[in-house]
Amino acid sequence: MDKFIINGGTPLRGEVQISGAKNAAVAIIPAAILAADKCILDNVPSISDVNVALEILADMGASIRRLNKSKIEIDTSCILDGRVSHDLARSTRGSSYFLGALLGRFKKAQVPLPGGCDLGSRPIDQHIKCFEALGAVTDLQHGIVDIRADKLIGTQIFFDKVTVGGTINALLACAMAEGLTIIENAAKEPHIVDLANFLNSMGADIMGAGTDVIKVKGVQRLHGTEYSVIPDQIEAGTFMVAAAATGGDITLTNVIPKHLEPITAKLRKMGVTVEIAKDNDNVRVIGTSRYEATDIKTAPHPGFPTDMQPQMTTLLTIASGTSMVTESIFDTRFKYVDELRRMGADITVDSRVAVVKGVPNLTGAPVKACDLRAGAALIIAGLAAQGTTEIEDIYHIERGYENMEIKLRNLGADIVKRQFDEEKLRKAL
Ligand code: EPZ
């Protein structure tokens, strides 16, 4: 059981390079199945969710070669089987994208229901609705989704609610369907656009990604390609908030400032200085000693991202005044609040609304990460707090942040990863 140990109070200073986007990479890796060919992917983050996606591919017979730290060659020509094992599927949400990709190529797929962060109910009814609209028949037995189709025929798909995963699966399933598919009420996140760009680079004909209506003209086959994944908007946002919370001054490189706009706007409103370089390829964040409270309501892109809600709530705990944070995407994304309370935060939660009363400072405490972004929020809290914070269950954090503690140490933070051997500890007691 590994832990992060943080001695808080040091302002972050220096430059940090942002890695490739987790949520784009975990969609693009299964999409490579559709090529039945070699794809070279660059700017792939080295995180455990990506490793799981690669392991699933390797399990199916794909050959995977790491060309360097962030560059991978995937050859999916030799995949024969469209099954995903229970253990691998249950560890990430992105495993559900193998449904769309396998269905698109083989017209059949068997994938156990996905896992991922526990944020409340996370059904896949909209994904299934889309596969069925394209002509597939689905069955759920023993936790495994079984889909089959004689052929996939382009159609009109209207999502009842905006869903990132549903939109990704729709793109994967209809890229090679017969005729035109129109996806309405589509998600507009940067990683949806990235997946569409990747598929187009393989020969797909997709227009409108990034708007709420996406048109896909099915093509007969796709081919291999070379593609670079976009930078991670949420990793960047997390470092921006960490710089603000510690009163630091950092420059983020390998970012797309446009993707950071909802985060930048809120930080500026609180009194954080955010400077965007003229050539648009880096962002400088200059913190101060006290911020103004503000209200936040999460919403699908281009609204404030739910994946930045825990990190921003943490910054609000040390702002002047009272803020209201409303979570509109997931049922239970405030579980980390109990941990922040251990550190002195004054937060009350009623269903999907948190009322945050700013306190002068947080104090270090032993805490537990309950999911990926909750873990990131606790790191920010630990960096800003007086004294020592020990964070348990950091495997959640390692699912989505590449070398988080190394990047923070390079910015001057006092953070180390300790490996605790539970067995040894028990014997010593
Ligand atoms: C993706 O999850 C991300 N995961 C999440 O990233 C992110 O929080 C979320 O989108 C919202 O931006 C990946 O990309 C792997 P949704 P996803 O489908 O696809 C409901 C992170 O920290 N819904 O947009 O699961 C659902 O319950 C994470 O990196 C249905 O009702 O999100 C939720 O309330 C965690 N039926 C809402 O829609 C469906 O069929 C949005 O979910 C699908 C979704």
Image (cartoon, helix red, strand yellow):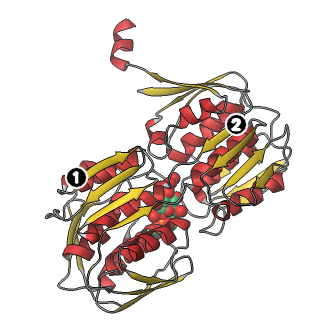
The answer to whether 52 is drawn above or below residue 280 in the figure is: above
The answer to whether 119 is drawn above or below residue 159 in the figure is: above
| Residue at which label 2 appears | 14
Q: For label 2, count other residues whose C-alpha is less than 10 Å away and answer few (under 14), some (14-19) or many (20+).
A: some
Q: Residue at x 29, y 73 (%)?
A: 223
Q: Residue at x 82, y 51 (%)?
A: 270
Q: Quadrant of residue 151?
A: bottom left
Q: Quadrant of residue 341?
A: top right
Residue 80 visible to an observer of this rendering: yes
- Give percent across and percent down for residue 359: 80, 36
- Give percent across and percent down for residue 266: 76, 57
- Give percent across and percent down for residue 39: 32, 63
Q: Residue at x 69, y 49 (%)?
A: 312
| Residue at which label 1 appears | 58
Q: Quadrant of residue 219?
A: bottom left
Q: Quadrant of the C terminus?
A: top left
Report the side of 137 relative to 126 (left or right). left
Give the mark nearest the N terminus, 2 or 1. 2
Q: Nearer the viewer, mark 2 or mark 1?
A: 2
Question: Callout 2, which amino acid?
Answer: Gly
Question: Callout 1, which amino acid?
Answer: Ala
- The secondary structure type at the circle numbered 1 is helix
Instruction: Residue lying at the far top in this picture: please name it.
Output: 428
Report the side of 103 relative to 96 (left or right). left
- The secondary structure type at the circle numbered 2 is strand
